[in-house]
Image (cartoon, helix red, strand yellow):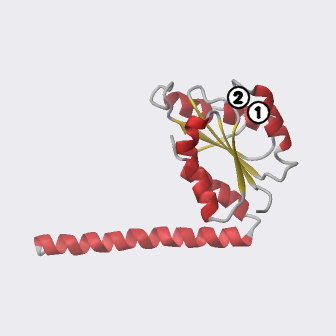
Amino acid sequence: MSHPLVGIIMGSDSDLSVMQAAADMLKHFNIPFELTVVSAHRTPLRMVQYAESAQKRGIKVIIAGAGGAAHLPGMVASITTLPVIGVPVKSSNSIDGWDSVLSILQMPNGVPVATVALNAAKNAGILAAQIIGTSDGLVAAALQQYKHDLSAEVLKKAEGLKANWENKFDV
């Protein structure tokens, strides 16, 4: 396996059930990645070390998932110049996920974090692929095919619905 281009980090291994979707999308696009637990609150020195070393290790994008107060994406973004995609995770200590969404979304000017919807790690994986695809033609082509397949799937469903509707009501 070639060196990882995307780092997927999460505040706790309990976030893995959500963050797995980002890994699955990166696998789909054949983008090498690493996946680990880095807690902003419980292992702050590990978080700093991870953020400081990521670019030197060849990482191009970091996907950071966190629940509750969700400081991990913003703290990592404050340390690195790499793009950071935050995934708010609805956790057991969360206020229906809103605390996580707002903690990641409401970053101060100068420290941007791209933020996806609550538990939307799949979108974070796609966004990371789009960032990688700006300089990798194979990834860009795979993304184009993915978008085409999404469109074809919707059109197929629309045709099925139309046929079912016409058969039921004989319009």
Query: Residue, x 81% and y 32% (percent of image)?
Result: 48
Residue type marked 2: Ala
Q: Which residue is mark 1?
A: 47
User: x and y percent of residue 111 in the render?
Assistant: 74, 36
Residue 110 visible here: no
Residue, far right: 56
* Nearest the eye: 115 or 4: 4
| Residues at marks 2 and 1, CA–CA distance in whole angstroms | 6 Å
Of pointers 2 and 1, the one earlier in the residue sequence: 2
Q: Is residue 26 left or right of residue 148?
A: right
Residue type marked 1: Met
Q: Quadrant of residue 66?
A: top right
Q: Is residue 153 above or below residue 14?
A: below
Q: Residues within 10 Å of mark 1 (few under 14, many from 20)?
A: many
Q: Is residue 70 left or right of residue 59?
A: left
User: x and y percent of residue 91 in the render?
Assistant: 51, 31
At mark 2, the secondary structure is loop
Q: Quadrant of residue 153?
A: bottom left
Query: Are discs 2 and 1 less than 8 Å apart at CB?
Result: yes
Query: Residue, x 70% and y 72% (percent of image)?
Result: 138
> What's the mark number on residue 153?
none
* Quadrant for the N terminus in the image: bottom right
Q: Is residue 83 left or right of residue 148?
A: right
* Quadrant for the C terminus in the image: bottom left
Residue 25 visible here: yes
Q: Residues within 10 Å of mark 2 (few under 14, many from 20)?
A: many
Q: Is residue 7 left or right of residue 116?
A: right
Query: Residue, x 62% and y 33% (percent of image)?
Result: 12
User: x and y percent of residue 15 in the render?
Assistant: 57, 38
At mark 1, the secondary structure is helix
Q: Which residue is mark 2?
A: 40
Query: Residue, x 52% and y 46% (percent of image)?
Result: 120
